Amino acid sequence: MRVDRGWRALVPGLVIGFLVATCGGPSAPSTSAPPASSATPATTPAPTSPEPASASPSAAPTPSATPATGSLGTDRVNVLLLGVDRGPGREDQASTDVMMVASIDPVGKTASFLSIPRDLVDVPLADGTPYRQKINSLVREADVNPGRFPGGDQGGEMVLAGALSRFLGIDIPYWASIDFTGFKALVKAVDGIDVFAWRPICDGTYHDDRFDGFGVGQGRWRMDDDEALAWVRVRKPPPESDFTRTIRQVQALIGLRERIVESGLVADPLAALESLGVVRTNVPDDVVEGLANLAPELTNDRIYRRTIQPPELVDEASDARGYILVARDDDIAAVVKILFTKPGNRPTTGKVTRYVSDDPAKELKGARC
């Protein structure tokens, strides 16, 4: 049965948000500078690899003296994080265009994240039956036709969690979801976020109630709620894509976490966010308590992240379903093995690329091409 606890769902959403926000890796700045109109954008060269910063230490066991307190126990805690393509004017759309599996190790005190591409096809459902359509449509389809899917009586999110559990070979019992409106509400509550554009972006096809085209120059920018939403949605023209958009989504989460700390919301998040009601989840309160106790120890060098993307882990193709991604099962299994290690063993990713800057943020002022 789907759990929707209103404002109480903000607690796990906030905790999980903190964890995801640190997945930029060891190069992520620990604090964000205040906006300054005289600041100049960063001049860091644009990287060539579409993978955000991530630590890659030895996979040697590094057990902590004691497991994290709370009710986490000694097993990994796996949560499916979802960003839903739904907002004003898009109420009938519920594609999960952002999908990320977060796995927290309470023994080694690390967190691992694996991003799932929306165009992945033929993912097995919990009973092994292949889901032929793109994976981002599964939650919507299961909600409309629950009897057709294993676990459908528990809601579309659990159907997707069951499918990804089978696909990755790990148990994913929990999920947390946010949509456009919720994301904007969080950004607005902290009076904007700071992000780093490692290269200029100009998408003349992006349209919403405010923008007829969206663009930013290279540098570190303070964005309001509308600008931040555009930042995490834009994926055109090349070289932008779903995969570079994933990097920008991580940037936004880093900025959101930093602004939550700066604004003081972290001191009393319930009082500040009770009226927003922006996160839906089935994460139980006792697990939230354990995550909250562990979160301060998850420093940037203990966060690991990979994206399932071509050409390493999926093959690109096109058929009646449109542009699709076909999994390379053995290669994905190898990544899962090093990313979601046995509790107490340090994960690794093999990817080190920096997409952050310590430069002061500059007011965006318009954000048009």
Image (cartoon, rainbow, N blue to C red):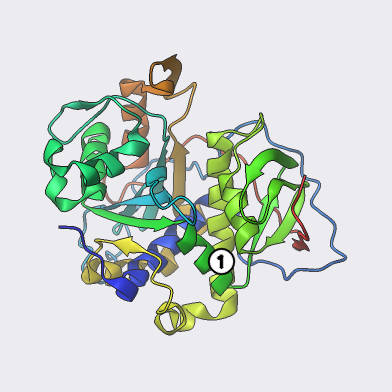
Front-most of residues 318 and 351: 318
Residue 202, image x, y percentages: 73, 40
Front-most of residues 24 and 96: 96
Residue under the image location 22 percent in, 35 percent down: 169
* Rendered-image quadrant of the C terminus: top right
Vertically, is 81 above or below 15? above
Looking at the image, residue 236 sits to the left or right of residue 6; the answer is right
Vertically, is 329 above or below 243? above
Residue 218 seen from this side = yes
Q: Amino acid at mark 1?
A: Val
**Which residue is under mark 1?**
187
Vertically, is 131 above or below 188? above
Residue 212, image x, y percentages: 70, 47
Residue 227, image x, y percentages: 65, 57
Q: Residue 306 sits in which quadrant?
A: top left
Tally the numbered discs: 1
* Rendered-image quadrant of the N terminus: bottom left
- The kind of secondary structure element at disc 1 is helix
Quick one: label 1, few (<14), some, or many (20+) residues within 10 Å? Answer: many
Residue under the image location 66 percent in, 30 percent down: 239
Residue 257 seen from this side = no
Front-most of residues 105 and 134: 134
Looking at the image, residue 264 sits to the left or right of residue 61; the answer is right
Q: Residue 70 sits in which quadrant?
A: bottom left
**Farthest residue, direction right:** 38
Residue 193, image x, y percentages: 63, 64
Residue under the image location 56 percent in, 44 percent down: 247
Looking at the image, residue 57 sits to the left or right of residue 146; the answer is right
Residue under the image location 60 percent in, 42 percent down: 234
